[in-house]
Amino acid sequence: MVACRLLAYFSEHAFSHWFVGRSLGICFTGYGLHGTSHPRAYPPGVRWVFSRLPLLSARVDPASLRAATPAGRAAMYAAGTAATVVASVAITDYCWRRGARRARGFFVRANLLSVPLLLSESLRAGGDLRRAPRELAR
C-alpha cells in the first residue's frame, strides 16, 4: 500500500505535466530524476528525504511554452498538482475499500499531506497553482 503510493508519487506530477502539455501542443526538452525542487514545502525531517528521492521531472521547451495558448499553459501547470491530489485520494481510497490493514489511517495521513502541497503550489512564487491563473490572465 505504501510502496504503491510512493511509486506513484515519484512520477505522477511530472507525467501529468507532460501528458497534458503534449496533448495541448507543448513540447518538452528532456526528463530527469532528482529530489524535489522546493524542499521548504516539506516538514524538516521529511525535507531531507524528499530532497534526495528520485522524483521524475519534465523540462518544458521555452519556445513551445510561449507559443501555446494561455489555457494550454494554465492546464499544463495545474495538471501536476491536480494529478498528485487525485492519485493520493484514489490510491488510498482503493486500499481502504479493499480492506487493507491500517488503510483508513493511511488514507487520512496521505490526504492531509495534500494540504501543504496545495498551499505551497498556490502561495509559492513559482508554484504551479499560482502560475496557472496568471497564464489565463495574459
Image (tube, rainbow, N blue to C red):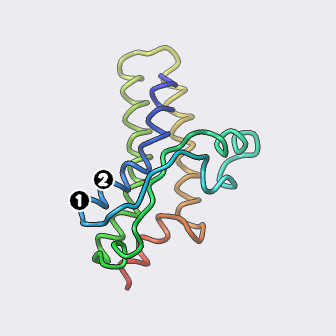
Q: Position of residue 46 (x, y in %)?
A: 69, 40
The residue carrying mark 1 is: 23
Q: Nearer the viewer, residue 83 or 35?
A: 35
Give me the C-alpha separation between circle 2 and circle 1.
6 Å
Q: Nearer the viewer, residue 96 or 41?
A: 41
Q: Amino acid at mark 2?
A: Phe
- Residue at image coords 63%, 56%: 38
Query: How many numbered circles are shown?
Result: 2
Q: Nearer the viewer, residue 6 or 106?
A: 6
Q: Dot 2: within a 10 Å radius of its alpha carbon, few (fewer than 14), some, or many (20 or more) residues?
A: some
Q: Position of residue 102 (x, y in %)?
A: 53, 18
| Picture layout, residue 64 above or below residue 11 | below
Q: Dot 1: within a 10 Å radius of its alpha carbon, few (fewer than 14), some, or many (20 or more) residues?
A: few
- Quadrant of the image occupied by residue 8: top left
**Residue sitting at the far front:** 29
- Residue at image coords 64%, 42%: 50
The residue carrying mark 2 is: 19
Q: Are marks 2 and 1 in contact (CB under 8 Å)?
A: yes
Q: Amino acid at mark 1?
A: Ser
Q: Position of residue 15 (x, y in %)?
A: 38, 48
- Residue at image coords 52%, 25%: 2
| Picture layout, residue 53 above or below residue 63 | above
